[in-house]
Structures are given as C-alpha cells and as structure tokens.
Image (tube, helix red, strand yellow):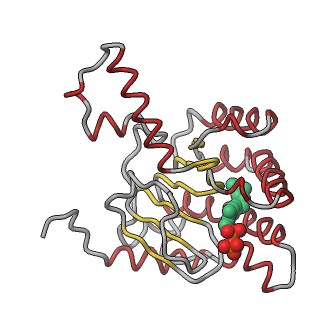
Amino acid sequence: MGVLFNKRESEPQVSLPIHMGIIMDGNGRWAKRKGLPRTFGHKSGAKNFRSIVKYCSQIGIKHLTVYAFSTENWTRPNEEVIALMNLFEQYLIEALSDFQNENIKVKFLGEMEKFSSKIQNLIKEVEKSSQNLTGMVLNIAMNYGGKREIVNAVKILAEKVIKNDIQVSEITESSFSDCLYTAGQPDVDLVIRTGGECRTSNFLIWQAAYAEYIFTDILWPDFKFKDLDNILTLYAKRKRRFGGV
Ligand code: FPP
C-alpha cells in the first residue's frame, strides 16, 4: 500500500492532479520476459488496473482516464484482440461491485458500436448503474482515438451550423470541448505512460494540451501503488505555467 497518499489514513500531503490519464503500456513485454504468451501480460495488466483504479479513488483523484484499447489496436493478431475482449467482458462483470463500493462513476470514451453486443450491453449497464455515483469519474477509453474524437466533434459542430442552431462565430474552445467524449470534465493535468515509450499515441490530444507528462520504464503489470506515489510526488514539484512565465 502506498503511504504518502493514503487518504483513508490522512489527507494527501501534496497537491494531486484533478484529472489524470494513464497509458497502460508494457503488458506484452512483461509476459515475454517471463516466457509467457502476450495474453498473460494483459491478464496481469487487467488485475493491476483494477487495483490501481481503487487506489486512485481512495487517494482522492477526481477524474481518471485510462487507455484500454485504441482505434489502432484492432490490427493486432486476432487471438490477442479476442483475449483482450474476453478480459474487458470479465472486468466489466467483476468490477461492478468495486464501482458501487468505491462510489466510482464510469464513462466509456470512444466508438462502442464496434464491440460485441455483450460488451455493449455491459457498458450500458455499468454506465447506468454508476451514473448517480458521486466519487471519482473513471473514463475507460476503448476503441478510442484522439484524432477521431476531434473529427467527431467537428462533425457535431458542422451539423449544428448547417441546422442554424449555432453561428460559426459561436465555435470556441469551450463549445468544442463540449462536443468531445469528455464533455463537462476538466482538462487533463497529468498523463502517465508506463512501459518506457515516450509518445502520446493519440491519447487525449486535445484535453492534455497543457498536461504534464511522466514516462516510466516500469511495465504496466509491475506498476504498483508506491510507483504511483513517486510519480505524484514528482508531479507536485512541477511548475505549471500554461504558457505564461
Ligand atoms: C498495452 O500493452 C496495453 C494494451 C493495448 C491494453 C491495455 C489493457 C489492459 C491493461 C488490460 C485490460 C483493461 C481493462 C479495462 C480490463 P502492450 O500490449 O502494447 O505491451 P507491449 O508494448 O509490451 O507490447
């Protein structure tokens, strides 16, 4: 258990990001290093995901967005895609009780139509049963792409202009944000990427325009509470100037 940020025992001692994003990378390499198939890495990653979500809620993160499956991940070998779909299904069933116990409101970001009807139904059930919960908002990005999200927002605004619901002059950063999957939620303060790669991979490219990025070599299944505590301590020391001086 992390110590610095354990809200159940004391208030966090440093300022936390209000909205935190996590790119959970490195499952495949974690498994390979152990001589196991990649799918074992995802299984271990899903288990870790479940406990990190609970920890984030307990230490007082208000919005957590995780990258579970990108619009590009469909190009992976079929057996890996199937294994990931099975894990999503299992997680959505098993974690339902976590959301109620931890008061977590869940939202899914992305185009859900591409998932099986079973997964789509579970998604609807999870969103519906957690919609009135008042604790942390957990955004699960699935079949998500930042560029696609932006194009989608452009289409929504274009339709409104065509229908004369709004004027072009009314298109602002704020009205644009309202057409993103994260409408109504604050911009992202911190993005963590595990697994050693230093890129954004099409994740929250609008919302994270002024986010701090922290990259760690730790592979996602090995990323534990103390590692998160260390990153949050680093984040708290960053001077955020938002383009000012
Ligand atoms: C990246 O690791 C991880 C993914 C593409 C999937 C993320 C999924 C999980 C953490 C598990 C399930 C999630 C939920 C919501 C239950 P990678 O395969 O790219 O690893 P590599 O870079 O080592 O190949």
- In the visual, does 2 lie left or right of 87? left
The quadrant of the rendering that contains the C terminus is: bottom left
**How many numbered dots are placed on residues in this image?**
0
- In the visual, does 176 lie left or right of 56? left
- In the visual, does 14 lie left or right of 116? left
Question: What is the quadrant of residue 75 in the picture?
Answer: bottom right
The structure residue drawn at horizontal position 31% and vertical position 61%, both measured from the top left corner, is 210
Q: Position of residue 160 (x, y in %)?
A: 36, 20
- Ligand 1 shows up in the quarter that is bottom right
Q: Position of residue 44 (x, y in %)?
A: 78, 69
- In the visual, does 150 lie left or right of 95? left
The quadrant of the rendering that contains the N terminus is: bottom right
The structure residue drawn at horizontal position 38% and vertical position 74%, both measured from the top left corner, is 235
Q: Position of residue 172 (x, y in %)?
A: 25, 36
Outermost residue toward the left in this view: 245
Q: Nearer the viewer, residue 132 or 82?
A: 82
Q: Position of residue 178 (x, y in %)?
A: 37, 35
Q: Is residue 37 above or below residue 158?
A: below
Q: Nearer the viewer, residue 143 or 213?
A: 143
Q: Is residue 181 above or below residue 223?
A: above
